[in-house]
Amino acid sequence: MPSNDGAELLKYYEVYDTIGTGGFAKVKLGRHLLTGEKVAIKIMDKKTLGGDLHRVKTEIETMKNMSHQHVCRLYHVIETHNRIYLVLEYCPGGELFDYIIAKAHLSEEETRVFFRQIISAVAYVHNQGYAHRDLKPENLLIDDDHNLKLIDFGLCAKPKGGLGDELMTCCGSPAYAAPELIQGKAYFGAEADVWSMGVLLYTLLCGSLPFDDDNQMALFRKITHGKYWNPPWLSQDSILLLKQMMQVDPKRRVTVQQLLDHPWMMKGYSSPVGWQTKRPLGHIDDDCITEMAVHMKRSRQSTIQLVSEWKYDQTTATYLLLLAKKQSGRPVRLLRHIPPQEIIFPPMYDSTGTFLHSPAMILDDNVYSPRGAYPGKMDRFDGLEESKENVPVSNRSGDVFALPPPRTPAGIKKNRPRKGPSTPNKTNTGSACTEQPQRGVLDQSPHAADLEALTLSPERRSRSLDAAGCQSDSAQKRKGGKVFGSLERGLDKVITMLTPSKKRTIRDGPRKIKAQYNVTLTSQTNADQVLQQILDVLPGKNVTFVQKGYTVTCKTLSDMGKTTLHFELEVCLLQKPEVVGILRQRLKGHSWVYKNLVEDILLSLSI
């Protein structure tokens, strides 16, 4: 029987391309039909999750209890027989990790803007009674206004007795783990988080890890001894703060409370880090309620009652997305809702230009993958099993990467007015997601430009692997005789999402894009020569690859044939300056291994 797991999702969202992958999750760009807002949809298959299903439940219940300006917002939870869908706040800027390696390392001023936001988020999480336990640059996303959002709460813990209760579970990412944790000792979650934040601060300031080794046991020895190198550009104040945060003895380690008004944090600021939420849980906004009441033809009181149940269903999602529109200075308006079966979608073509059909949505891999990062992987140490001591949370009803330089965080932009040093976070009234009038049943189908307006950005697209599977699927669709003859049958198929114009782009030449921080500029003007150089270099780096047009999808394999690293390199043309660039994107695997390998590949090119 064909799966219809996606039908419930289609009632409320248009679903577009993949913007992130992880160990057991895939993240799609989506658009909420009623509000027109962009969202990230995290898709998890229950069979794939297996024993990690409880972590997803932990993440869901934790995020229901989180509402903070620097924590990624949960809008909607949809659970079907086979899948779990989490609809989350969309952060187009990608991972903080990519930002760091693009700049080699950040200045102390820029680091301070980011790190105050990190402390604000962690202090809030701790105040809610949780320890995050997986703090790292990959779990911090950059939003529209270039501010940070903390994600991935699958490893968090909420002890019954509060953070004063000891934990025993060894989890997280080894390079960021505290000494007491890797030694198998009882530890306090807040103290372990401070150590991880110290490692994170070091990566911001230095562009590398303080403790690193290919051998995990050697890595653990380095962490246990707490010895690391301080590069010459670090100020004495930064060196002192790092020492205070990465104290091997947790009792001598600085606390989050002390970090709030630490002299290093206060430099250039007139007040301590503000950790209190600006978005209180349970807040009811009159304008949002009024708009929903009119749309649903209900009284305001009954609408308030419905919203106040906080079921994280369509009602919750609609309210929170309306509230997000208001907070960004846009009109609090709902669009006319079109039932999914009446939505007209753009035509689909395979790589030869053959018409396939018009999809209702795509839940599996497709050719176009706009870039973003909502990692689904929740790491734990090899050989160390999750203990049962954590109680369930309460259920509330190098230089080659450095060109061009990325944008400066909103808090220190010189051409923008500031609210004051204590409030670098600022809503963006010029959001990339502009309101689009909802199309009627008789309107024309959306063009390629409409899709691009809903994706991360056309300049950050690349292609994935499975074109062959798409062609076999297209044959089945043509036999059906009707484009929309089987909506359900199309939900779980791999579909090539190409309009005719996109098809010609792959066939005729590389894409033209704007410069951005995950694009390495070259001095070349011939894209074919650069592409051939990449193809020649990869075998010598023990990288297997598949080429599709000007995109090369790369993998490294373990001795057992398991994929250890998965990434893409796309040869493209920069609009200004008019030279060839190489857009890079990590899809799966260790971030720093990816960084080192791609740097090695790029340095091996004659570009």
Image (tube, rainbow, N blue to C red):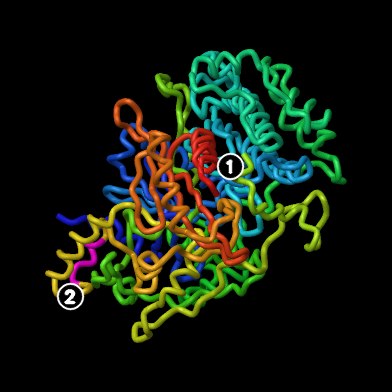
Amino acid at the residue labelled 1: Phe
Of pointers 1 and 2, the one earlier in the residue sequence: 1
In the rendered image, the residue lying farthest to the bottom is 442
Q: Is residue 454 left or right of residue 268?
A: left
Disc 1 to disc 2, C-alpha distance: 46 Å
Up-down relation of residue 255 to residue 72 (above or below)? above
Q: Residue at x 80, y 49 (%)?
A: 422
In the image, is residue 187 part of the stretch drawn in magenta?
no
Which residue corresponds to mark 1? 97
Q: Is residue 82 left or right of residue 122?
A: left
The magenta region covers 485-490
Q: Residue at x 56, y 55 (%)?
A: 91
Which residue corresponds to mark 2? 482
**Other-residue count near label 1 (Cα within 10 Å), few / some / many at <14 / 14–19 / ≥20:** many
Question: Residue 337: x and y, percent?
Answer: 41, 75
Question: Residue 126: x and y, percent?
Answer: 63, 35
